[in-house]
């Protein structure tokens, strides 16, 4: 439905703004490679000359930051 589409678009824009404004450049790159391009952790690590654990740590921190900021944003809208 139209409402669902608008809500999805709004959520997408909120998350995109959080990614753009709150994450480090490395975190942005890793999130993009993993979530958008669908690369495996080992491939991201190889491309960026990092250990797999470092990639996982950055991804985890990025996801936590996105979640934390999204919840704050949602709480502010209520």
Image (tube, rainbow, N blue to C red):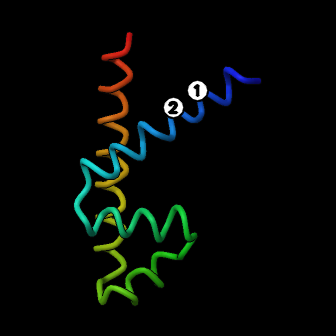
The answer to which of 16 and 68 lies nearer the viewer is 16
Distance between the alpha carbons at the discs numbered 1 and 2: 5 Å
Drawn side of residue 22 relative to residue 63, left or right: left
Does 8 appear above or below 75?
below
**Can you say which quadrant of the picture contains the C terminus?**
top left
Position in image of residue 7 (x %, y %): 58, 26
Q: Which mark is residue 10?
A: 2
The answer to which of 33 and 2 lies nearer the viewer is 2
Position in image of residue 39 (x %, y %): 54, 75
Position in image of residue 46 (x %, y %): 40, 89
Q: Secondary structure at mark 2?
A: helix
Position in image of residue 27 (x %, y %): 30, 63
Quarter where residue 50 is shown:
bottom left
Residues at marks 1 and 2 touching, judged by CB atoms closer than 8 Å: yes
Which residue is pictured at 36% across the width and 43% down the height? 17
Residue picked out by circle 1: 7
Does 45 appear above or below 6?
below
Drawn side of residue 32 relative to residue 57, left or right: right
Which residue is pictured at 30% across the width and 89% down the height? 49
Q: Which mark is residue 53?
A: none
Which residue is pictured at 41% across the width and 36% down the height? 14
């Amino acid at each position: 439905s139209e409402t669902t589409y608008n809500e999805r678009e709004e959520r997408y824009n909120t998350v995109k703004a959080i990614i753009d404004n709150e994450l480090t450049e490395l975190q942005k790159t890793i999130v993009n490679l993993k979530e958008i391009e669908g690369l495996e952790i080992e491939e991201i690590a190889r491309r960026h000359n990092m250990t797999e654990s470092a990639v996982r740590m950055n991804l985890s921190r990025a996801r936590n930051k996105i979640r934390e900021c999204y919840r704050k944003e949602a709480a502010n809208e209520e």
